[in-house]
Image (cartoon, rainbow, N blue to C red):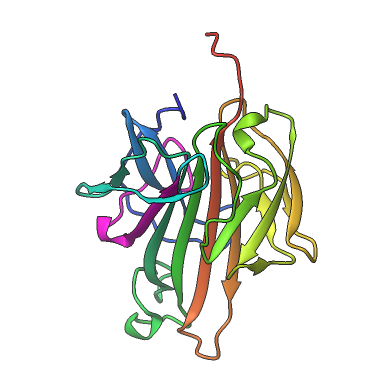
Amino acid sequence: MYAKKLALSFALCGALSSLAGAHGLWIAQVNGDMTFSYGHSGTNTDAYTPDKIVQAFGFKADGSKVDVATKKYDNYVTANTEGVAIVAGVMDNGYWAQDKNGKWVNQRGDQVDGAESSAKSAKYTVAYLNERAKVQPVGLKLEIVPAVNPTTLKEGDELKVQVLYQGKPLEGAEVSNNYFNEHAKTVKTDKDGNATVTVAEHAFNIVAVGHKAKSDDRFEGRSYHATLTFEAKHDHHH
């Protein structure tokens, strides 16, 4: 099985600014279906409007690009990954601002009482589904590209990654090797966008990175978050 079954719960939360608290997007098997999950915890994911998943595509083992069919439910989306070695997805999460009481609101700041700023949020995810997948950038605005197919590695192995923003290496980005662990250490990318992380889990892993783009308009900031997910090699003994 590609990933641990992750329970879905549907308490909508706001988007936090730090990497440790930031809501991310990832794809994992939930009740037998490959599901675009949103939140910052593997056991307590958040509901979202299905229309926020604006793109889903994949690659076969030979590197050729294919469409990925999705199915929308009330508050989540699943993907048909049959025959797909890598799957990628994009969430347009809209504008987020804090109101006068500090509550996060999914609106542009000039429409929110007491908001001093806002940012438009986008979430990106890439999942390596098997050892046959050919390593390659997939063309997302923000993405984590592994140097080797991460499904061939075990817990404790080193994984070199490159962070790309708009197709170019992103220097100084903080990469977490364990998105579900808020205490996980982050590693900053070098001038070539490279960083080396340790495979954190014996099974399902999420490597994560965030990036913010400033704007002259305080209500037009941009907030990006990307994940790389894979299942490490492990024994299937119980």
Query: Which residue is painted at 39% across and 36% down in the image?
Result: 83
For the residue pair 33 and 110, the one nearer the viewer reads as 33
The percent coordinates of residue 102 (x first, y second) are 44, 69
Q: Quadrant of the N terminus?
A: top left
- Residue closest to the far bottom: 216
Query: Which residue is painted at 63% across and 37% down in the image?
Result: 150
Query: Which residue is painted at 45% across and 68% down in the image?
Result: 121
- Residue closest to the far right: 191
> Would you say 175 lies left or right of 87 here?
right
Query: Which residue is painted at 55% across and 9% down in the image?
Result: 237
- Residue closest to the far left: 74
> Would you say 52 lies left or right of 160 here?
left
Number of numbered discs present?
A: 0
Vertical placement of residue 139 versus 101, above or below: above
The percent coordinates of residue 216 (x first, y second) are 55, 91
| Snapshot quadrant of residue 113 | bottom left
> Would you say 146 lies left or right of 82 here?
right
Question: Can the viewer see residue 19 in this picture?
Answer: no
For the residue pair 162 and 83, the one nearer the viewer reads as 83
| Snapshot quadrant of residue 93 | bottom left
The percent coordinates of residue 238 (x first, y second) are 52, 8
For the residue pair 109 and 127, the one nearer the viewer reads as 127
The percent coordinates of residue 155 (x first, y second) are 68, 28
Q: Where does the magenta region start and end? A: 38-59
| Snapshot quadrant of residue 210 | bottom right
Question: Can the viewer see residue 191 in this picture?
Answer: yes
Vertical placement of residue 118 versus 210, above or below: below
Magenta segment: does it hold 56?
yes
Vertical placement of residue 88 versus 18, above or below: above
> Would you say 60 lies left or right of 151 here?
left
